[in-house]
Amino acid sequence: MAARHLTNFRAINLTGDLSGDIWIDDAGVITGGPVEGAETVDLQGAYLSPGWADLHVHVWHGGTDISIRADEAGLKHGVTAMADAGSAGEASFHGLREYVIEAQRETVKAFLNIGSIGLVACNRVSELIDTRSIDFDRSLAVIEANRDVICGIKVRASGVIVGSWGITPAKIAKRLADISGLPLMVHVGEAPPLIDEVFEILTPGDIVTHCFNGKRGGSIRDTPKLMEMAKRKAGEGILMDIGHGAASFNFEVSAQAIADGMVPYSISTDLHGRNINGPVHDLATTVSKVHATGLSFEDCVTAITDHPRKVMGLEGPRVGQPADFTAFTLENSDEVATDSQGGTLKLGKVFTPIAAFKNAHHVPASRRVA
């Protein structure tokens, strides 16, 4: 791999020593000064940020019936790091690690599903039928053996998954998370359990994914009291994650929450085979949608860089560490986007990745939307 010299960019959320030109040596490490023979990459005034990170994807391709290949979510779309959000439970995590996590150029971390079988037959065979679906001891053993890549525990707490079991699986998952010292990511949606029941068991650092879903009975916009509760919990340190998905992002809920002062902590896609061709497409389109509902440019960038990277245990790029950057533009656009309930909204501006720099790799990037 050739050494590279990155020049002519607008730094955003980068460390002070990376605000000028950036030099990357043949090994992909950021140096403190010029590297002889380096290829100059003129970014032509584009923004340069820490590598985009998607906190909620499904990339255990072949291990579940919904997962995509990690390449489809990664560098060629500006994403240098991602977290698989519960595709694998304890019974199949070894495969996710060997065939995806260890094989990718991107950094791939994972939330371990509390259900032993994970999402092998997603929404056809529930991973949480009853107590036999969870093996607490085996899950703990998998966590201990994979602490370098497991960044949390995942539970899907909605009626289509848990049926009459209600809040109990989420409580079991919370106990596992507490014992293992990891955050809990909770998928919220159709009741049971009620979303306020979920909020009550969470502690600072835990994550609510699908936070701006529009499902009646499972949305923070159902009542003013729920909206206030969500805002209070976010203020107490519960991390609100977008998790767009095929059914879990609503323009009206997002606009109302942001206008009320509720800033999502992270913007993620929940990208998988059933939404990659719409309505989600990719992280660039997802962050553009949230921006169109009122979130500031700076908060959008933080929500796809610093915040998800922190959850994944990743530092920002700095001198002496491997390169990890995304170059992107913010362009005017008349594009009309669709949310998960079929609602439409003119974006006005779109985030467009143009390149990803990961270790010694320099990959041209683009949005997936036609």
Image (cartoon, rainbow, N blue to C red):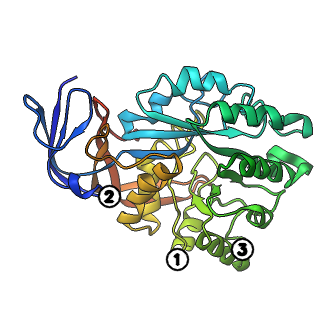
Q: Say which quadrant the N terminus sits in.
A: top left
For mark 1, what is the residue? 261
Q: Tell me if 330 is positioned left or right of 144 in this view.
A: left
**Residue positioned most to the left:** 36
Residue lying at 70% horizontally and 31% vertically, measured from the top left: 142
Which label number is shown at residue 13?
Answer: 2
Instruction: Tell me if label 1 and label 2 are in contact, CB under 8 Å.
Output: no
Q: Is residue 367 above or below residue 216?
A: above
Q: Say which quadrant the C terminus sits in.
A: top left
Q: Position of residue 18 (x, y in %)?
A: 22, 52
Q: Is residue 138 above or below residue 308?
A: above
Q: CA distance from mark 1 to mark 2?
A: 22 Å
Instruction: Tell me if label 3 and label 1 are in contact, CB under 8 Å.
Output: no
Q: Earlier in the sequence, mark 1 or mark 2?
A: 2
Q: Secondary structure at mark 2?
A: loop
- Seen from the viewer's position, the closer of residues 277 and 230 is 230
The image quarter in which residue 306 lies: bottom left
- Seen from the viewer's position, the closer of residues 156 and 132 is 132
Residue lying at 70% horizontally and 25% vertically, measured from the top left: 92
Residue type marked 1: Gly
Q: CA distance from mark 2 to mark 3?
A: 33 Å
Q: Secondary structure at mark 1?
A: loop
Residue type marked 3: Leu
Q: Is residue 77 above or below residue 208?
A: above
Q: Is residue 232 above or below residue 36?
A: below
Residue lying at 54% horizontally and 25% vertically, measured from the top left: 100
Q: Nearer the viewer, mark 1 or mark 2?
A: 2
Which label number is shown at residue 70?
Answer: none
Residue type marked 2: Asn
Which label number is shown at residue 226?
Answer: 3
Q: Tell me if 205 is positioned left or right of 80 in this view.
A: right
Q: Earlier in the sequence, mark 2 or mark 3?
A: 2
